[in-house]
Image: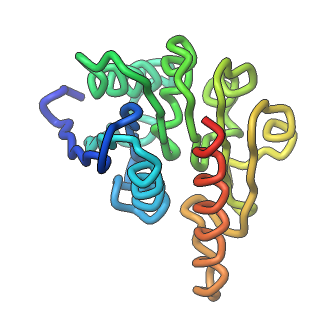
Amino acid sequence: MSRAETQYVDHAAQGASIGRCVVLPGRQYTPEGPLLFFAAQAALMRGWDVRQVWWEAAERGSLASADEAEWVGDQLDAALAGHTGRVLVVAKSLGTLAATRAAAHGYDAAWLTPLLTEPDAAEPLSSYPASQLVVIGADDPFLSQDVLDGLPGTKLVVPGDHILRVPGDPVAMVASHEQFVRAFDAWLGTL
């Protein structure tokens, strides 16, 4: 992956900004997917400038997990180049591999559908040094209830799969997203 393949879309909070919220997508889940769209809107309303990261990630399994985590961490660093203020990370799935890098800087973070069944991906969340929110679907194949129970911070399990889709029940799917937005907005209010 080269940096040339990554693009940013910036949104400015109305009034004085309290910092930069970096939105890291999933492998195939863009910053305009519902979870990340609603998160960005809530962050903007809470006074954060938002930088959406749009990338072309390598195919799953084509990189060693350490190399993939390094690439995602580099994407986070690049999105913050020159920024000296407060930072909030909002990451979905693949983007949650930035946890080690975010932890090293002490950034507050919301990890959406993290890869809790993958030890290398889950380990940084288990001792995360800043405020963290972890949200995952009850039917997400990456949910490990034991790992989730051991994490510090705020945790939320809602109906749905890895993208909070509830097959055959669009109202339940919308309700899952609403539960996430309410929890995320309340968590933002504690930062």
To which quarter of the image does residue 120 belong?
top right
Nearer to the camera, 28 or 99: 99
The answer to which quarter of the image holds residue 175 is bottom right
Extreme residue toward the front, this view: 15
Q: Position of residue 181 (x, y in %)?
A: 58, 61
Quadrant hosting residue 170: bottom right
182, 175: nearer the viewer: 182
The quadrant of the picture occupied by the N terminus is top left
**Residue at x 75%, y 34% (from the top left corner):** 153
From the viewer's perspective, tell me whether residue 88 is left or right of residue 23.
right
Where residue 171 sits: x, y (%)?
Answer: 62, 86
The residue positioned farthest toward the top in the image shown? 104
Q: Where is residue 108 in the image (x, y as percent from the top left)?
A: 56, 29
Q: In this view, does 177 lie to the left or right of 136?
A: left
Tell me how many marks there are: 0
Left or right: 122 in relation to 13: right
Residue at image x 63%, y 64%?
161
Q: Which of 67 and 152 is in front in this view?
A: 152
Above or below, 118 against 34 in this view is above
Task: Residue at 42%, 54% (x, y): give it.
Answer: 45
Q: Looking at this view, name the residue that lies furthest to the left.
A: 4
Task: Give the image location of residue 27, x and y in percent.
Answer: 40, 46
Q: Which colour scheme is used?
A: rainbow
Position of 161 relative to 1 (above/below): below
Is residue 150 depicted above or below 86 in this figure? Answer: below
Residue at (52, 23) in percent of width and height: 107
Q: Where is the C terminus found, in terms of image quarters?
A: top right
In the picture shown, does residue 36 fall above or below 51? below
